[in-house]
Image (cartoon, rainbow, N blue to C red):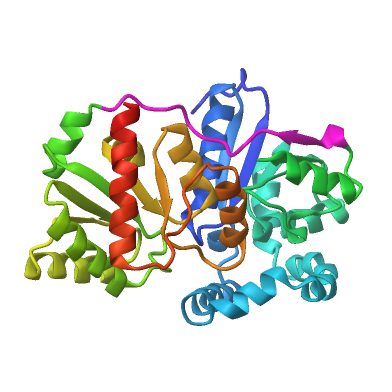
Amino acid sequence: MENNTNKKGKILILYTSIGLGHKYIALNIAYHLEKAGFEIKLADVLKVQSGIMVDVGEWFHSLINRKFPFIWRWLYFSKAFAKVTMPFRVPLAGKNSENIQSAVKEFQPDMVISTQTSASAPMAYMKQHKLFNGKFVIAFSDYHFHPYWFYDQADFYLVNIKEQKDALEKLGVSAEKIAVSGITLKPSEDVNVESVKQKLGLTGKDVVLMSSGSLGIGFPESLLLDYAKELTKTQPNAQLVVVCGKNETMKKHLEDEAVKLKLNMTVLGFYEPMSELYAITNVFLTKPGGLTVAEALRDRVTMLTTHFLPGQEELNYEYLTTRKLMHSIPSPMTPQNLVSRTVELMKQKIEVE
């Protein structure tokens, strides 16, 4: 049995696995806290609270994002919707928090850190009803502020940008309860570029990396294939590497099309560590997901935005492009314009290096 006598304290980190960003931010926070001597336990709220309410919530989230993104956008931006629904968040979470309460009681942490609002709500209920007397901390994962991330019951906030701190202070949160820490990442890894290229069969190629996000949604496959055709035709030394995340259907279809159309395209599923791909990449085509952007910025990768999901990524895009942290979506978005912008950025990278 592990000897915990030298541990500084016990910390439970809660996350949700819809979209892997929240999970990996939780894992990154855990990495640093374990290094600092704390005993850490991680828990996926969706698994802990498995049941009909969770199943319906996951189904609804997927349906809205895939089929009706305009509805999600309205829900995310509507001040009226937020004002009406926010008072019900904590009571509703309390009705389905038995398993979370059991997990907290079993581990008896000194602190609970949440990386997503679905995990924050049950903890807010427990704090409100004195079912947990330790510290309750909320960590943000994007580059803007949404009122749904604010809970009166929180003892501390780990925010990414000053604007989030300002927004919390306007809501009455004391500055002493907020740390502008940025998105928590693990340290950069040393990568042997030639070794990774050899492993993936990319030796001698200029690499254009494209990520569809962990859910593999948002960018039309037809446009992606047209882009791959144009890139193959005009830039024979460039190889497009597409990371499909959890979308196995998309991966299989793109693999088949790459062979049939003789495209310079390598198709990957979920890939770890992404730092290997960042190290070999000339230009990264991506959407403005919080964790992905933070990792790419850490590894000094040139990013060209291809699309964003309505709501949080839309606001991330505005923040990041206005500060020139990633390049804007080509307008109009055509395969030719996307290839032209890709080549332009590849040349700029070569000139800088």
Position above or below: 320 against 338: above
Position above or below: 272 against 85: above
Residue reaching furthest to the top = 6
Horizontal placement of 212 versus 257: left or right? right
Position above or below: 328 against 195: below
Number of marks in picture: 0
Residue at 71 percent of width and 69 percent of height:
77
Image quarter (top left, top right, bottom left or bottom right) of the C terminus: top left
Q: Quadrant of residue 280?
A: top left
Q: Residue 193 placed where, x, y %?
A: 22, 30
Residue at 28 percent of width and 28 percent of height:
191
Residue at 89 percent of width and 39 percent of height:
174
Q: Residue 84 placed where, x, y %?
A: 84, 75
Is residue 180 part of the magenta span, yes or no?
yes
Q: Using the rendered image of the protein, determine whether residue 272 is visible from the camera's viewpoint.
A: no
Is residue 317 part of the magenta span, yes or no?
no
Q: Residue 136 placed where, x, y %?
A: 76, 43
Horizontal placement of 26 versus 154: left or right? left
Q: Residue 41 placed where, x, y %?
A: 57, 40
Q: Using the rendered image of the protein, determine whether residue 338 is visible from the camera's viewpoint.
A: yes
Residue numbers of the magenta segment:
175-191
> Looking at the image, which is closer to me, 229 or 220?
229
> Looking at the image, which is closer to me, 96 or 121?
121
